[in-house]
């Protein structure tokens, strides 16, 4: 029984990877760079996206928003006059706690790929499942807020290990927390040595210019996934 479960899991991931490659081919054909933004619920993904959507003046941006239910985050981003496509995983996809390649593929007809340079995908808030499923992205960004504690890289290593950038958000709250930034960075290096990281505050804007410049550089280079 244990072996059967492993084979099923591997088969699901293999099928997902095949669809992810098809998604990637479509993105490449249209010259669209795709960044998959992941985090726990409430880490500040949407606010960080709002910040860069406003500031990336020379980049045409689209957003694919993933949630189990509702369109609260999508509505906030759509108010910035960028094309936003909503994916709700419940009930259409069984209430999944992540986006997978097939969900993204189902949404592609609604995304104006000819009109954008950068597609920002805000994944469902979860520290486990989104890391397991490639969706055709160029880059993965992990948002970790200081309110979550320093141990998260050790407790959820795959999420931190599979990204190219870690945004440590809500640093404006540090004076009010018993939180050791150096300890978090030490734990981060333990699971993903040398991964790029930035200290940011979505609320005050501290560090957001560096996050914006990182995205602009990814679009300019049109890089393939690491």
Image (cartoon, rainbow, N blue to C red):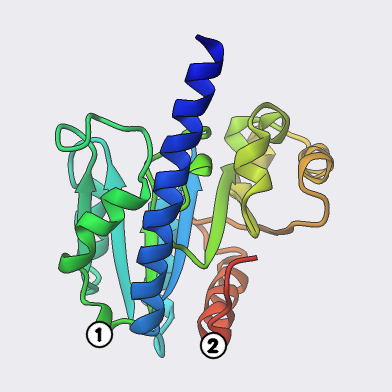
Q: Which mark is residue 220?
A: 2
Between 176 and 27, the one nearer to me in the picture? 27
Q: Quadrant of residue 156?
A: top right
Q: Is residue 222 above or below residue 99?
A: below
**Which residue appears at 68% of the width and 35% of the height?**
157
Of mark 2 and mark 1, the one earlier in the sequence is: 1
Would residue 16 be found to the left or right of residue 184 on screen? left
Q: Position of residue 133 (x, y in %)?
A: 46, 45
- Residue 87 is at least partly visible in this image: yes
**Which residue appears at 28% of the width and 42% of the height?**
67
Q: Are marks 2 and 1 in contact (CB under 8 Å)?
A: no
- Tell me if mark 1 has few (under 14), some (14-19) or many (20+) residues whose alpha carbon lies within 10 angstroms of its own: few
Q: Position of residue 163 (x, y in %)?
A: 62, 53
**Which residue appears at 45% of the width and 36% of the height?**
11
**Which residue appears at 55% of the width and 12% of the height?**
2
Q: Position of residue 174 (x, y in %)?
A: 67, 41
Between 128 and 8, the one nearer to me in the picture? 8
Q: Which mark is residue 115?
A: 1
Secondary structure beneath label 1? helix
């Amino acid at each position: 029984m244990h072996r059967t479960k492993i084979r099923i899991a591997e088969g699901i991931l293999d099928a997902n990877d095949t669809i992810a490659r098809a998604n990637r081919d479509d993105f490449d054909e249209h010259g669209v760079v795709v960044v998959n933004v992941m985090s726990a619920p409430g880490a500040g993904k949407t606010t960080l996206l709002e910040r860069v959507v406003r500031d990336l003046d020379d980049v045409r941006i689209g957003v694919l928003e993933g949630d189990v239910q509702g369109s609260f985050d999508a509505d906030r981003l759509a108010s910035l006059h960028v094309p936003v496509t909503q994916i709700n995983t419940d009930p259409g996809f069984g209430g999944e706690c992540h986006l997978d390649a097939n969900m993204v593929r189902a949404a592609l007809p609604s995304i104006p790929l000819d009109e954008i340079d950068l597609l920002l995908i805000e994944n469902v808030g979860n520290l486990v499942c989104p890391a397991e499923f490639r969706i055709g992205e160029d880059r993965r960004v992990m948002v970790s807020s200081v309110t979550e504690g320093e141990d998260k890289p050790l407790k959820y290593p795959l999420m931190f290990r599979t990204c190219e950038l870690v945004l440590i958000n809500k640093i404006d709250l540090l004076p009010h927390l018993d939180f050791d930034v150096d300890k978090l960075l030490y734990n981060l290096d333990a699971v993903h040595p040398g991964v790029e990281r930035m200290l940011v505050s979505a609320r005050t804007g501290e560090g957001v210019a560096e996050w914006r410049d990182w995205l602009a550089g990814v679009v300019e280079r049109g890089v393939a996934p690491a």
